[in-house]
């Protein structure tokens, strides 16, 4: 899996470097791609959390004793 991750990163860098568009355009494209990836990742995490046990509120631990 680590090799696949490294290859993906190298492919993205290669594509960016071989493109003739301005650096600002590359930045905007990467920003848009990051936004799309974050939305999809959040969607998948939400689906996973709905399949698992309920999440406790921030700062609370299940079966924890207060001091």
Image (cartoon, rainbow, N blue to C red):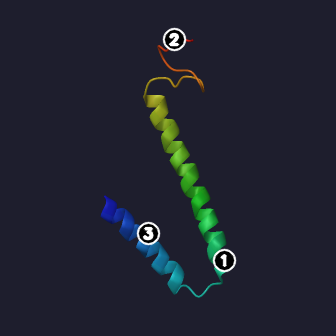
Front label number (1 vs 2): 2
Residue denoted by label 1: 25
- Residue at the spot of label 2: 65
The secondary structure type at the circle numbered 1 is helix
Q: Quadrant of the C terminus?
A: top right
Mark 3 / mark 2, whichever is N-terminal: 3
What is the x, y in percent for residue 37? 54, 56
Residue 35 image-quadrant placement: bottom right
**Picture coordinates of residue 56, whole percent (x, y):** 54, 22
Q: CA distance from mark 1 to mark 2?
A: 53 Å
Q: Regarding mark 3 in the picture, which secondary structure is present there?
A: helix
The disc at residue 9 is: 3
* Number of the front mark, 3 or 2: 2
Q: Quadrant of the N terminus?
A: bottom left
Q: Is residue 4 left or right of residue 35?
A: left
Q: Is residue 67 above or below residue 5?
A: above
Q: Residue furthest front?
A: 67
Q: Is residue 3 above or below residue 46?
A: below
Residue at image point 49% right, 40% down: 45
Pinpoint residue 6: horizontal percent, then vertical percent.
Answer: 38, 67
Residue displayed at 43% across by 30% down: 51
* Left or right: 53, with 1 as reference point: right
Residue 50 lies, in percent from the top left, at: 48, 30
Give the SS element for disc 2: loop
| Vertical arrangement, residue 17 with respect to residue 29, above or below | below
- The Cα atoms of the two marked residues, 1 and 3, are separated by 19 Å
- For marks 1 and 3, the one nearer the N-term is 3
Quote the CA–CA distance across marks 3 and 2.
45 Å
Marks 1 and 2, the one that precedes in the sequence: 1
- Measuring 55% from the left and 44% from the top, which residue is drawn there? 42
């Amino acid at each position: 899996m680590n090799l696949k991750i490294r290859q993906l990163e190298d492919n993205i860098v290669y594509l960016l470097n071989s493109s003739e568009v301005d650096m600002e355009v590359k930045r905007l494209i990467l920003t848009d791609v990051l936004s799309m990836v974050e939305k999809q990742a959040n969607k998948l995490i939400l689906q996973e959390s709905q399949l698992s046990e309920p999440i406790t509120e921030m700062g609370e631990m299940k079966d924890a004793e207060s001091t």
